[in-house]
Image: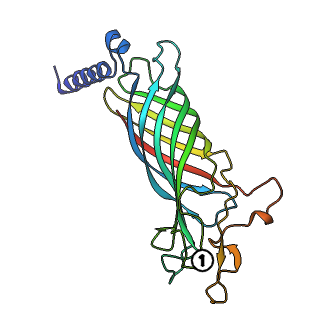
Amino acid sequence: MNLKSIFVLLGLTCLTILAQAQAVSDVVYEGRQRYGLKMGMGMSSMYGGKLRNPRPSLGVLAGFYLHSKLDKKSPWGIQSGLDLRMRGSNFGNGRPGDTAINRSYTKISIMSMDVPLLINYRLTKQRDVNVKQLQLGVQVGYNFNSILYVGPSKTPLPTALNAYNSIQTWDKLPLKAFDYQASLGFQKRGESLGYSIALKYGLRNLNNNFLFMGMVDNDGDGVAETQQELIAPTTNPSKEAPGTPQFIGTWSLEYALIF
């Protein structure tokens, strides 16, 4: 046997081993786990005309997933679960020289519980060890808290700018509690570990009369006599078209490990 024949034989052997490694038996196939945990992080931001100068920010997510049994004939399936997620946006509104307590909001964080409702389309053969899927659907969420940060140092907004300039509290912002987002992603699952990548885009206007009004002492006499918007720049609802409040939405790009 010459050297060329040996290389050909070794190559065929490697291909055979690789092909065998990419498939599972009927027993393993039937016993594949259909649920698990996921943990990851995402880059998110807000969009729309209500809030000014949005910038991406980093957030985290954790939850569990449950998907339908991998069908031997059809590549289609469904997947759902429950996620705890922190997302939001930075804002380029802080000015040099600003103090921590001022009228420039520089970050908003939203904490939510989300239920993804996804359709899976399998890209690999049904017995492949690594299952690759496209995912398309919606994510329904409940925003249970939100926080406003001000100034370049992104300090949580206090309950007062000073003794005379009072304002609303810094959490539970005037954003709608329920949200829904379109979701498009890719998922790869191995025998014990995998990952997913998803792009999510908010479809609902979260603006729930998003305005921070307070009494301001303009003349310095110790009496707050003027009511005005204290957190800027936002847009006064009185300047918006009736019934069409300016949009506040979110988008995110997420990466998660799945177990």
* Spot occupied by residue 101 in the image (x, y as percentages of width and height): 51, 76
Q: Is residue 122 above or below residue 178?
A: above
- Residue type, numbered disc 1: Asn
* Spot occupied by residue 91 in the image (x, y as percentages of width and height): 55, 66
Asked which colour scheme the image uses, the reply is rainbow
159 and 54: which one is in front?
159
Classify residue 77 as left or right of residue 63: right
Q: Residues within 10 Å of mark 1 (few under 14, many from 20)?
A: many
Residue 164 sits in quarter: bottom right
Mark 1: secondary structure: loop
* Residue underneath mark 1: 165
Could you tell me which quadrant the N terminus lies in? top left
Q: Is residue 113 above or below residue 35?
A: below
205 and 144: which one is in front?
144
Residue 191 sits in quarter: top left
At x 50%, y 52%, the residue is 87
* Spot occupied by residue 118 in the image (x, y as percentages of width and height): 55, 30
* Spot occupied by residue 243 in the image (x, y as percentages of width and height): 81, 53
Could one spot residue 120 in this view of the protein?
yes
At x 49%, y 58%, the residue is 57
